Image (tube, helix red, strand yellow):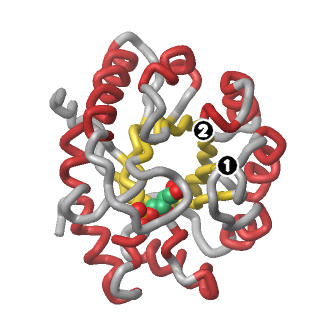
Amino acid sequence: MAPSSKAAPVRIAPSILAADFARLGEEVRAVTAAGADWIHIDIMDGHFVPNLTIGPGVVKALRAHCDLPFDVHLMISPVDYMIEPFAAAGADIISLHPEAGPHLHRSLQTIRGLGKKAGVVLNPATPVAMVDEVMDMVDLILVMSVNPGFGGQAFIESQLDKIAALRTRIDAHVKAGGQPIDLEVDGGIDRETAPRAIAAGANVLVAGTATFRGGPDSYADNIAAMRGAG
Ligand code: DX5
Ligand code: ZN
């Protein structure tokens, strides 16, 4: 595995999939106060992934509760028709899977055309090379360290090598004058896997179960531990 460049500070993005859905506004405020950097919002359609979550209406309602960047992870197919509604609802970063639509380049153009940051998501079986032709038009690459659809799954170890390979590509891209690209990891992140993902080169960690475990009194400790400050 290639060593991390240690470029950017580590950011923690709690996934509200593990929050109490009956009190989502309160939960978002609580993790914000506990030190979260971004709010990760999982959008599932029961078709691209075998689970259903929320639509733009809920994202819009949450916007009033929090000023942190909303990191919206679209797990829906087709995906293009929902980009504008999520942008209008208050998403700051919109990420999608290459398998979710026929024209990844066009989808990324659409996101950036709306003034939002664009992300591409790689499933565990999706090769690193999927990003090669779009490196100049993404603000974020998200490595799935579980198969998308559910929180609480075990971290897939093979994704550490993928993170390291992407770190090497991103650093070379930036060194050659390209725009900065965040490298995010999503799935099975906890106190044990977080430092390993960071060492491999990730600079944004999504964590649902490990953030919300223990209730609001534990959120600050949970977040600090994953950031490496606990
Ligand atoms: C899975 C989602 C993840 C999920 C992570 O499809 O993309 O964001 O919430 O949950 P944990 O952190 O519990 O693995
Ligand atoms: Zn996610």
Residue 112's place in the image compared with 191, above or below, is above
Q: In the drawing, what numbered circle is on residue 168?
A: none
Element under disc 1: loop
Left or right of 35, for residue 130 = right
Q: Position of residue 29 (x, y in %)?
A: 52, 78
The reply to whether callout 2 and callout 1 are in contact (CB within 8 Å) is yes
Look at mark 1 in the image and give the residue it sits on: 48
User: Could you tell me residue 71's position as x and y percent?
Assistant: 56, 53
Question: Quick check: can you spot residue 168?
Answer: yes
Task: Mark 2 and ligand 1: say if the CB distance to the nearest ligand atom is below 8 Å.
Answer: no
Rate crowding at label 1 as few (under 14), some (14 to 19) or many (20 or more) other CA atoms within 10 Å.
Answer: some
Q: Residue at x 40, y 77 (%)?
A: 212
Q: Please name the amino acid that badge 1 sits on.
A: Phe
Give the residue displayed 31% in from the left and 84% down from the top.
Answer: 218
Tag of residue 97? 2
Residue at x 40% of width, y 86% of height: 216
Residue at the image position 54 percent from the left and 18 percent from the top: 136
Front-most of 38 and 98?
A: 98
Tally of marks: 2
